[in-house]
Image (tube, coloured by chain):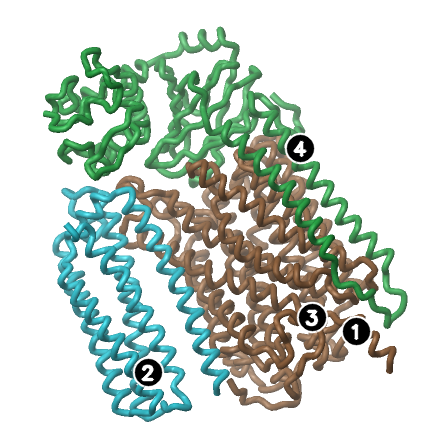
Amino acid sequence: MGQQLEASVLGMWVFLVTEVMFFGGLFMAYILYRSLYPDAWLAGSHELNEMLGGINTVVLIFSSLTMALAVRAAQVGSWMGQVVNLILTIIFGTTFLVVKYFEYAAKFEHHLVPGPHFDPARDPAQQLYFSLYFMMTGIHALHMVVGIVLMLIILRMAWKGRFSAEYYGPVEVSGLYWHFVDIVWIFLFPLLYLIGKHH
Amino acid sequence: MQSSFPLFPEAASSIASDVDLLYFFILAVSSFFAILVSAAVVYFAIKYRRRHADEVGHDIHGSIALELIWTVIPFVLAMVMFFWGADLYFRLARPPADSMEVFVVGKQWMWKVQHPEGVREINELHVPINRNVRITLGSEDVLHDYYIPAFRVKMDAVPGKLTTMWFKATKAGTYRIFCAEYCGTQHSGMIGHVIAMEEHDYEAWLAGGRTTGTAVENGERLFTQLACITCHKTDTSGRGPVLAGVFGSTVQLMDGRKVVVDENYLRESIMNPQAKIVLGYQPIMPTFQGTVSEENLLQLIAYIKQLKAPAAAPAAGAPAAAGQPGGK
Amino acid sequence: MTHAGNNSGSYLDAPHGIASWLLTKDHKRIAILYLISITVFFMIGGLFAAGIRAELLTPAGDLFTADLYNKVFTLHGVVMIFFFLIPSIPATLGNFLVPIMCGAKDLAFPRINLLSWYLYLIGAMLTLGAVFMGGVDTGWTFYTPYSSMASNTNVTLAALGVFIAGFSSILTGFNFIVTVHRMRAPGLTWFRMPLFLWAMYATSLVMILGTPVVAITILLVGAERALGFAIFDPRVGGDPVLFQHLFWFYSHPAVYIMILPGMGVISELVAAVSRKQIFGYSFVAYSSLAIAIIGFLVWGHHMFVSSQSIYAGLVFSIITMIVAVPSAVKTFNWAATMYKGSITWESPTYWVIGFMGLFLVGGLTGLFLGAMGLDVHLHDTYFVVAHFHYIMVGGGVMGFLGGIHFWWPKMTGRTYPETAGKIAAILVFVGFNLTFFPQFVVGYLGMPRRYHAYPEEFQILNVLSTGGAGVLGVGYLLIVTYLVASLFKPRNAPANPWGATGLEWDIPSPPITLNFETEPVVTEDAYNYAGRAQKAREN
C-alpha cells in the first residue's frame, strides 16, 4: 500500500530527527569544551589512532553502499542482490565494531578511561575530552548494534523472499536508519580523530 | 524587624524601589488584562446564555483588525517590560568602580564571609549603609545562591568559578539572607542576616573584629607557603610570568587567544593551570585543586590584584611583562 | 494496520478479556490504559504534595527530617511532570481523539502506540523503585554538581525511569505527526481540522524535538555518577551551567507540551459551549505553532542569575516576551468566540471559565519573570512556584479535566451527574486559588523554593496555602468518585450530548472499534454551527 510506505518513511524521518537532537546535545557539550580547552582537545585527539578511525570510516561508507544496493535489489525483486548486499552490510558493520573494540581496549590499557583510573599525570581537562569521546562513540556503537540486529531481521525476511517491487518498505526504512548512523560517524571521525592533523 | 504579618518586603537598597516600580507596572498591566478578559468571559456567558435547545451562536468568523490590535498592543507592552527589565538588570550586573569588596564563599551549609580588612563572619554580613558593596561569590562544593530579599539582589555561587553581585544598603537594619539554589539537606538552614550600619558604627565594628590578617596579608602568606614565589618571581627570571600589574591587563595565550586577566582567570590559572597558558611559558605549573579552598583562592586573588607593576617596567601599560617573548 | 476485531459492538465490548486489553492495538483502549495509569500517578504525586503542604503549615521543619522533605518535593515534581502532566492530555484524549478527528480507523502505527504505554509503565516502575529504595533528593531539575556528585540518593535509577518514559513521549508525538500528515480523511484539509488537532500536532513537534535532549542530558548525569565520567565536574574544568543549558533546552519546551494540549481542549470546549465558530480560527492555529517553535528559544530565562552572560540573557528575555504574545492572542480569540454565542451553563462551561481565569494569571505572571531585573528578585522563590502551578494546574489540569468531562460520554458511554460536575469545578477553582495565590505574595516577600523550614513571618500565607490545598484535594477526590461511579451505571449516553460539531460526535457513544462504519468525507469547516443551522432551516 502506497499510504503505508509513505507513512513508514515519514515515520523513520521523524525518528531520525529525534536522533539528531539526541546526538546534538553531545555535540553542544563538545563545542563548548573544545572552545574552552583547545589544548586538552588537541592532546586527547593525538591519543586516537587515526588510521583505525580512517579504516572504520571507509568500512562504514562501503556499508552504506551495500545498503543502498540492497534497497535497490529489493525494489527490483532480485533475491541474490538483496541477500549478498545485506550480508556484506552486516559484515562491514561488524568489522566496525571489532575495530572499535580494539580501540577501546587500548584506551583502557593507557589509562585514558575517565574516572578513578585516569592517568593522573595528564591535564585534568583531558578527562572531559575522553568522557565525550566514550559517550559519543559509545552511543554511536550502540546504534550500530541496533542497526546490525535490524539488518539480521531484514536479511531473514529477504531470504524468505518477502520483498518485491510491491513491498520493500522495511528495507528502505532500515536503510534510512543505517545511512543516518553512518553520517553520524562521518561527523565524529574528524571531530574526534583529526584535531590539528592538518599541520 | 518587620510586622508579624508582612505582605510586602522592605526596600532597603538603592535599587529596591526601582525593582518594585517595575513590579507594580507589570502588576497593573496584568491586573488590567486579567480583570478585563475574565469579566468579559463571565459577562458573555451570562448575556448570551442559551435560551432554547436548538439555538446556535452568530455566524462570526473573525476580524483582522481586532487580531492586529490585540497582537500589537500586548507586543508593545511586553517590549516596554523587556527594556525596563533589561535596564534594571544592567544596573544590577555592573558594580560601580568605587565599590568596597567583600568575599563570600558558600559551602554546604553555611556562608563564610571575609572582609578584606581581615574580619570574618559566618552567615552574617555587616555592611555600612550608603556605600557600594561588591561581593565576590564562590562555592566550595555545589551550587548555592546568595539572596537578600530586602535589597532585591541575588546571584548563584557556582563551583569552579567566581561570580559577583553588588548593592548599596540605604537603611540601617537587619535583613534576611537566604540560600536560593537547592543544595541538599540543610538548604533551608543556609540562612543568615545582613546587618547594615551607619558608617561610623561599621568602622567601629570592623576595628573591634577579631582578625586573622587582612585578605591581602593572608594571600601573601599563602603565596609563599604554597611556593608560588619560586616560579612567579618579581623579575622575569622565574619560570612563570611576573604577576605584578597583571590584573586587568590583556595577555596572549599559547594557542593564539587573548584574555583579560580578571578574578576568574586568576582562579582558573591556579586550579586548572593547563587551560590557558601564557605565550612563551611551559605548561609546568601544578594544579592546586584540592590544596586551596575557595577562601584561600579569594585571598590569593586579593593579593595578586594589588601587586603593582614595577616602576622600572617598560612604559607600555599592557600587556604585562608576562607577555614578552622568550621571557627567561 | 488491520484489526482482528468486528465492526459491531463498541470498542469496550469486543474483544473480551484482560489479554485483549493488555495486547490491544486499538488507540481508544490504549487511551483508557493510559488514563488509568496517569490517574494513579496523579494520586501518588498528590500524596507528595499533601506532604509538602502539611510540613509547611508550621515554620519549623517538624513533620519530616530535612532529607525526607527534600525527597518528597523532588518526587512530587518528578512524578507530576514526567508521569502525569507530560502524558496527560496527549496520551489519553489525544490517543482517543486524534484518529477519530482525522476520520481514520487508528493512528499510523498502532503497535508503536502500545509500545509507548509499556515504556511509560517501565519508566514509572523504575522511578517507583527509586522511591521504595529510599527516594531521590535532587529536585526534579537534577542540577549538577549536586545530582552528579554530591547526592547519595537513587539518582541514577530515577533518572533511568525518566529516560525511558521520555521515549514513551517521543513515540506518541511521532505517531501523531505521521497520522496528521498522512491519514486525514478525504476533504479534511489542514484548515478544516479541529483546533485540538492543531494543538496535538504542535505539541508533538515539541515532544520529538525536545525530549531527546533531556534524554542525552540524563545519560550524561548517569555516566558521571555511575561510570565516573567527567562532564559537569568543576574540579576538572567541567561547567555545571552546561547542564542547565542542556536541561532547560528540553524542560522549557516541555512546559508547552503541558499547556498546548490544554489550550486545544479549551478551543474545542469554547466552540461547543458557545455553539459558535472559533473567532480567528487560523490565528489560533498559527499561534499554536508559534508557541511550539518560539518556545525552543527561551530556555535561558531560567538562568538569569546562573552566571550566564548578560547578552545571552537579553536575547532570552526579549524572546520570552515575544512568546507571550501568541498565548495572549489565543485568549482574546476564545473570549471573542463567546461574544454573541449561544452559551450553555452545563458543566463544561465551568471548566472553560475556570481555565480562562487561571491561565490568565499564570500566563501574565510569566511576564514578571521574563523581565530580567525583576527576575533577579523572584528567581527560585515561591513566586515562580505559584506561576508554574497556575499554568500547569490551573491551565493544564483544568484543561485535562474539562476535556475528560466533555468527552466522558463519548469514551465511556456514560454520563456523570451534572450538579456534581459543577460543584467539582467550583471546588477546584476556589481551592486552587486559595492554595497558590498566597504563594505569589510570600514569594515576593522572599521565601525561597524547596525550603523545609522558613521564617515565622511567612506562616500565615503558608497556612492559607495549605488550607486551599485541602479544598483542592476534595475537589479532585469528588471528581474521581463520580466519574468512577458513573462506570457502574448503564451505558446510555447519546451520541452527541452537547449538540457539538466534530467527527467524534457523529459516531456512537462509545464508538465501535474501527471508529467509522464507512470512511467519512469532510465537506465543511470545523465548528460549522451557523452553516448547519442554516441548512436545517432550509429543510
Q: Colour of chain B?
A: green
How far is mark 1 from mark 2, CA to CA?
51 Å
Q: Are marks 3 and 2 in contact (CB under 8 Å)?
A: no
**Residue tagged by mark 3?**
C407
Q: Colour of chain A?
A: cyan
**Residue tagged by mark 4?**
B24
Q: In this view, does B99 lie to the left or right of A69?
A: right
The residue lying at 55 percent from left, 46 percent from top is C320
Same subunit, labels 4 and 1: the answer reads: no
The residue lying at 65 percent from left, 54 percent from top is C395
Q: Residue type at mark 3?
A: Trp
Q: Residue type at mark 2?
A: Val
Element class at badge 2: helix
How far is mark 3 from mark 2, CA to CA?
45 Å
A63 in relation to C382, above or below: below
Q: Nearer the viewer, residue A68 or A47?
A: A68
